[in-house]
């Protein structure tokens, strides 16, 4: 599938018409939307929107829009598609690293041309969003764009990997995978969810080696409040040995064990038959432990511990079988292969094996040599995940433009360009709040004091999957019920488009934004205003054509400088360039 084109804001000149067109399409599409867990999507006020659009068009045609405009409206400046594409592209792509050679050799074999390199403006935005889930500030973006140092991209990557937001954002990713959620159906309970999240975030922040991270999750015993890693065994809907085995296979091997033969699943489940749970006098506290004296009943009594590769395990009576399994796991190639594929998928948007938790014989990697290389890099670095991220981020492959150079349908799966994808719900609402200087309100269905979240808390830093908002639910925040990657839904929907176009939520953020108004107060010309808005929202300066378009809109509409700039901001946050990683 080819990447959808990024819609540049040069088309903002026809903003009212474009908005009306989108509403007409959405009017029909929204009829097919299924209700979400929080209820059906709110129907927009189409009548009001139609009347407003028709009134604006009538005024603009007559030249009477605004108090100061009694001149006929001129035609908008033409959109130069070729110039728009140059915003996103840099020089021709060249092999820079061993990783690139593996990708480019595969592309050459298939006669697929790689995209050009991405521009500096694209890279700074992409790196911030992919590494820390946060937009760069205008100052950060401009300092990078204007820097002439040859190694500035590498230096930026190193800085971002050390920021606190990196721990927040990647702890959010692990929270999805490890099902950090207080309420039904996971039922960790708030204080256990908080403890579990804090342990995960600290592991990410300190760059705990991945083999140690997995070993602690698998082998720890103790209180769910005081030994947070034991919540791995509690954060699953099915705590039976076979349910635990499925969760372990999904999390650490990237395999869906419900498709395994029964004997293979039972062999893995045998390692967890004596994992036990008991309550304490403290409310909702639970001890997770290995009970060697636990009496096994039914089929479980006959299971023989067998590693997923088919080798029988030798268990000693004085040793927890979970430790035996962990020893095997961290030495098995699939363990590193799975994590390497996940890291690649999280940064590039598509796994070498896709989906990244669906390894099986009939779903082969699109580039086996690339996957083997990343696996070896992870093992060679002693499971240093930041090292693996640096290898990927510094590659030319990661830094390719999102504008394809080939129409071959295999280009995306072979990483011939950077695949565009919509921002996650948490990242998107954080970006809106950062741009406008506003906050969000979050709630949880569990009425406990532990779940109170200050309004200035960022969405990527929410510690519990039960804590949410109507915006997060609408834009596809995962429920964290299964730990599968597909739980997160980043596909754009009609209801989402209508929310951004026509909701009081977004309108209030823009109209009541002290940050935007303060920023625009010292900008006296259309070019200065457009530059400030573009750098804030799109992390790049506007092109000359975009400045002319903004000036044309302000003149034609008769709006005052700040009001026209607020309209420009509204147009940009509804553009694909803002809504998508590219």
Image (tube, rainbow, N blue to C red):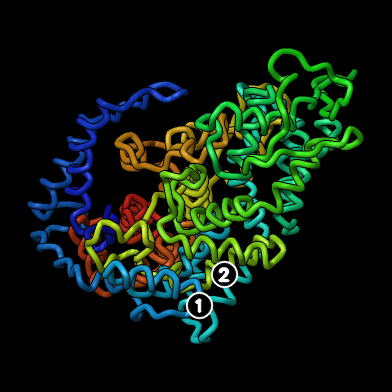
Where is residue 347 shown, x and y percent of the image? 50, 58
Local crowd size for mark 2, using a 10 Å CA cut-off: few (<14), some (14–19), many (≥20): some
The residue closer to the viewer here, 81 or 449, is 81
Where residue 330 sits: x, y (%)?
A: 71, 51
Residue at 36% across / 56% down in the picture?
Answer: 413
Instruction: Measuring from the top left, give residue 316's x and y in whole percent.
Output: 87, 36
| Quadrant (top left/top right/bottom left/bottom right) for the C terminus | bottom left
Left or right, 531 with reference to 253: left
Q: Which mark is residue 165?
A: none
Q: Which mark is residue 391?
A: 2
Rendered position, 119 above or below 481: below
At 83% from the left and 16% from the top, the residue drawn is: 295
Front one among 385 and 437:
385
From this view, report whether residue 529 is shown above or below residue 484. Answer: below
Q: Secondary structure at mark 1?
A: loop
Q: Are marks 1 and 2 in contact (CB under 8 Å)?
A: yes
Q: Residue at x 54, y 40 (%)?
A: 255
> Can you give x and y, in whole percent of width and height, for residue 350 in the image?
43, 53
Label 1: few (<14), some (14–19) or many (≥20) C-alpha neighbours in 10 Å:
some
In space, the residues marked 1 and 2 are separated at their CA atoms by 9 Å
Number of marks in picture: 2
Residue lying at 34% horizontally and 66% vertically, measured from the top left? 416
Q: Is residue 169 visible?
A: no
For label 1, the residue is 97
Secondary structure, mark 2, is: helix
Q: Is residue 402 left or right of residue 467?
A: left
Camera-nearest residue between 369 and 480: 369
């Amino acid at each position: 599938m080819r990447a959808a084109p990024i819609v540049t804001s040069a088309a903002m000149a026809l903003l009212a018409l474009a908005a009306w067109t989108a509403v007409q399409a959405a009017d029909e599409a929204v009829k097919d939307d299924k209700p979400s867990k929080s209820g059906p999507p709110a129907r927009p006020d189409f009548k009001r929107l139609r009347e407003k659009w028709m009134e604006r068009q009538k005024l603009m045609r007559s030249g009477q829009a605004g108090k100061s405009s009694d001149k006929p409206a001129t035609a908008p400046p033409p959109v130069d598609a070729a110039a728009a594409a140059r915003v996103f592209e840099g020089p021709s792509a060249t092999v820079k690293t061993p990783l690139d050679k593996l990708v480019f050799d595969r592309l050459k074999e298939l006669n697929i041309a790689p995209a050009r390199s991405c521009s500096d403006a694209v890279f700074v935005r992409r790196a911030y969003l992919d590494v820390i889930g946060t937009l760069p500030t205008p100052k950060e973006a401009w300092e990078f764009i204007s820097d002439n140092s040859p190694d500035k991209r590498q230096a930026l990557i190193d800085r971002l990997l050390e920021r606190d937001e990196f721990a927040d954002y990647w702890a959010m990713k692990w929270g999805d995978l490890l099902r950090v959620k207080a309420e039904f159906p996971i039922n960790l309970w708030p204080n256990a969810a908080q403890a579990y999240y804090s342990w995960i975030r600290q592991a990410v922040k300190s760059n705990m080696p991945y083999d140690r991270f997995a070993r602690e999750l698998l082998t720890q015993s103790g209180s769910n409040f005081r030994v947070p890693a034991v919540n791995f065994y509690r954060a699953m809907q099915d705590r039976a040995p076979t349910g635990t085995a499925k969760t372990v296979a999904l999390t650490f091997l990237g395999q869906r064990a419900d498709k395994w033969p029964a004997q293979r699943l039972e062999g893995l489940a045998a390692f967890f038959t004596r994992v036990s749970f008991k309550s304490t006098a403290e409310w909702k506290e639970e001890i997770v432990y290995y009970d060697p004296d636990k009496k096994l009943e039914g089929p479980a009594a006959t299971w023989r511990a067998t590693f997923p590769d088919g080798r029988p395990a030798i268990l000693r009576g004085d040793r927890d079988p979970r430790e035996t399994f962990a020893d095997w796991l961290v030495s098995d190639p699939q363990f590193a292969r799975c994590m390497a594929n996940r890291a690649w998928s999280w940064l590039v948007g598509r796994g070498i094996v896709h989906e990244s938790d669906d390894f099986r014989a009939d779903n082969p990697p699109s580039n086996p040599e690339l996957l083997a290389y990343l696996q070896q890099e992870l093992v060679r670095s002693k499971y240093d995940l930041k090292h693996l991220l640096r290898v990927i981020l510094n590659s030319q492959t990661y830094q390719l433009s999102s504008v394809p150079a080939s129409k071959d349908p295999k280009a995306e799966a072979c990483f011939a360009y950077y695949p565009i994808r919509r921002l996650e719900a948490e990242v998107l609402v954080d970006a809106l709040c950062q741009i406008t200087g506003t906050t969000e309100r979050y709630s949880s269905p569990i009425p406990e004091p532990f779940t109170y979240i200050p309004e200035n808390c960022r969405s990527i830093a929410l510690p519990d999957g039960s804590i949410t908002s109507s915006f997060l639910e609408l834009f596809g925040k995962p429920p964290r019920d299964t730990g599968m990657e597909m739980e997160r839904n980043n596909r754009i929907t009609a209801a989402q488009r209508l929310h951004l176009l026509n909701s009081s939520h977004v309108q209030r953020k823009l109209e009541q934004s002290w940050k935007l108004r303060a920023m625009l107060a010292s900008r006296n010309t259309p070019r200065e205003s457009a530059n400030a808005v573009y750098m804030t929202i799109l992390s790049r300066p506007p092109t000359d054509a975009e400045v002319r378009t903004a000036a044309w809109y302000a003149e034609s509409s008769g709006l005052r400088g700040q009001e026209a700039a607020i309209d420009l901001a509204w147009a940009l946050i509804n553009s694909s360039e803002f809504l998508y990683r590219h």
